Amino acid sequence: MAVGLFRSKRAYNWYISTVAAACMVLYGYDASVFNSVQGSANWVAWFNHPNQSLIGGINTAYTVGAIFGGFFLGGPVADFLGRKVGMGMGCVLVIAATFMQAFAPYHNIACFIAGRCIIGVGQGIALTAGPIYIGELAPPHIRGKIMTLWQTFYSVGSFICFWVNYGCTEHAARLGNWDWRMVIVFQLLVPCIILVLLPTLPGTPRWYIQRQNNVEKARSALQRVRETEEEVEEELNQIRGALEYEKEAISSSYSALWKDRSVRKRFLLALVLNAGQQLTGQGSLNSYSTIIYKKVFTSASQISLINALNATFGILFTLNAIWIVDRFGRTFLLEVGGIGMCICMIIIAAVETETPTLPNGAKTESVGIALVFLLFLFILFYKPSWGATVWIWTSEVFSMNVRAQAVGMASQTQNVANTIFNQFFPIFLDNDGFYAFYFFAGINLLLAAFVFFFVPETKHVPLEEIDVLFGGSNHHTQGENMLVETKLGLRPDNDETVATEATKPVASAHIEDSKV
């Protein structure tokens, strides 16, 4: 058993979370790969010099695939087949689509676009299952720290892609068409590693009970990640109680997303936060930083190096969330991040638009350095806040009956926002230049205000008790009462697991508590 290789349960928790968070490497790499290959003259020639509208369409193909995967496939796959199966299925689709992109026939942009669409479907499925898996197995007191890995690995994906691209750009004359193919082929690395390591991970106890009514498998999974038997039994009881209440008093189907007022409220909040994450300006920077920097610099190698350094610092900046997200809380980070990004965008727009442009279309070296510094400063504010914290908040606020579908749909509003905005951003940038950054400044200020007035704090709250923050009942307590009533014969026994020998000690303990 893989847990035997680790000296402590906490180390094993970090290991399984790291494997699950590696799904985000797929997203980070792919968000950067098309950005990278756009700078290759060989790629442009191979696909017959696509215009800006077609470039936007290629990005849209990916996001449409991701939206379809996240909205319609991610939740059902994670719920009915399991979180691990969801991650594995997403990796398989990414591998297949990578080959389609890397070896698309000459001038056959349709094959490349189809690969982008399929890779989006795969990521939509994997990015639904991954954060749910981490959220359901991580102990509450370190859940925020562990979930920080999720956004960190996005930066790791960008880091790998941009440095590979930089190396290929430096040797483009010798590599020929492999200068862009190599960048795409490297996308195979991480999904292959994930598929190899998935069998060493436990399933989630909540899924075992919710879908299989198997308390023993749930107990076995918890024993691999919790320090004591008392913790295991307490969490098992919380899970069973919450599921019993959700099944009896709310709905065991996805209809609770609009029927239950508390769930509906947090779902709408999650939609706004996830869409807002991409409208901060980071979504456009990830997809179009190459063409943005072309307005400042003329050297393709220099632009590749800046992108690579940006991704490198992105990892370090995201890691800041590990020590602050559970100390200061989710809402504090979102508010400070929004205000900081707003100020950065205002200064970036002012510096570029109010300084002279050289005859070759570039800026002076000092202006270029200032803009790169400011864009890096923007990333410093974004990564631990709207980068990492939005994923943390989204993965932990939903009750079990709707968690997979809600996380899948909410997270894919990122791609909905990207699809809408990135389709016309290249035209926006061509027509208005860096004045476009004033738009991002206004959005960031509005997002910070939205969090201040509407978003509750969730740090350290157990998953089964988080409903109370949104005006709902405590699913754990209500479910416990139902289980006790069933045991005492005061209500019908609708859950076969309650009657099993495995659950008798837990039920008995709560009967004693109720007597006291």
Image (cartoon, rainbow, N blue to C red):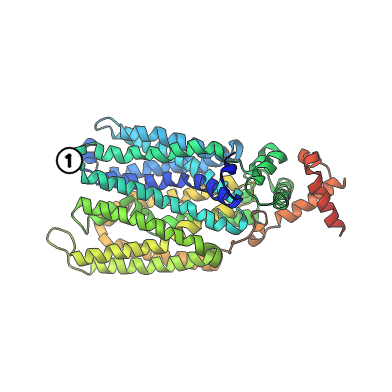
Q: How many marks?
A: 1
Quick one: 56 or 210, which is closer to the camera?
A: 210
Position of 232 compared to 142: left or right? Answer: right
Q: In this view, does 494 lie to the left or right of 70?
A: right
Q: Tell whether 174 sits left or right of 496.
A: left
SS for callout 1:
helix
Amino acid at dot 1: Ala
Residue found at the far top of this picture: 105
Quarter of the image that includes the N terminus: top right
* Residue 464 position by quadrant: bottom right
Q: Nearer the viewer, residue 95 or 291?
A: 95
Few, some or many residues within 10 Å of mark 1 (<14, 14–19, 20+): few
Say if residue 408 shows up in the picture: no
Q: Residue at x 29, y 38 (%)?
A: 182
Which image quadrant: the C terminus? bottom right
Quadrant hosting residue 363: bottom left
Q: Position of residue 14 (x, y in %)?
A: 54, 50
- Which residue is drawn at the image coordinates 39% and 42% (left, top)? 62
Q: Name the residue under label 1.
A: 173
Front residue of this view, candidates 453 and 497: 497
- Position in image of residue 84 (x %, y %): 55, 39
Visible residue check, residue 87: yes
Q: Position of residue 140 (x, y in %)?
A: 62, 56
